[in-house]
Amino acid sequence: MVIRDVQTRWNWTYSMIKRALELKEAINFWTLQVDQGAYSELLIKKSEWDELEKLKQLLEVRLCFPKCFTEY
């Protein structure tokens, strides 16, 4: 299941991006195959998947940041 973003919590953006990347093949299949490609305009380009991967990595650092200070 895809996770929806919540404006007030940036870590939900991370969760949404992470889940989308996990479901990349299914999302691509759905946009191209379901209803004979009726949703092809929603296809995420390779460059967009690459950007999502970069954002995920950036947000992973932010997700770890508060934990780093609570451990000391």
Image (cartoon, rainbow, N blue to C red):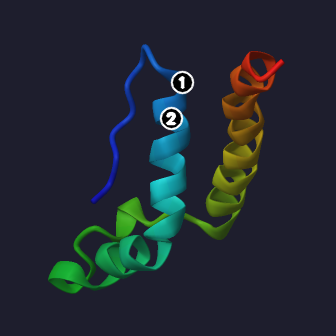
Q: Please, what is the three-letter code of the amino acid marked with disc 2?
A: Thr
Indicate the secondary structure of the residue bearing disc 1.
helix
Q: Position of residue 59 (x, y in %)?
A: 69, 36
Residue 66 position by quadrant: top right
Q: In this view, does 47 lie to the left or right of 41?
A: right
Q: Which residue is drawn at 42% across and 75% down?
A: 28
Q: Please, what is the three-letter code of the amino acid marked with disc 1?
A: Trp
Q: Position of residue 62 (x, y in %)?
A: 73, 28
Q: In this view, does 19 lie to the left or right of 57?
A: left
Q: Is residue 72 above or below residue 28?
A: above
Q: In this view, does 25 lie above or below 49?
A: below
- Which one is in front, 28 or 10? 10
Quarter of the image with the N terminus in it = bottom left
Q: Which residue lies furthest to the left in this view?
A: 35
Reading the image, the residue beneath label 1 is: 10
Q: Residue at x 21, y 86 (%)?
A: 36
Reading the image, the residue beneath label 2 is: 13
User: From mark 2 to mark 1, how far is it between C-alphas?
Assistant: 5 Å
Quarter of the image with the C terminus in it = top right
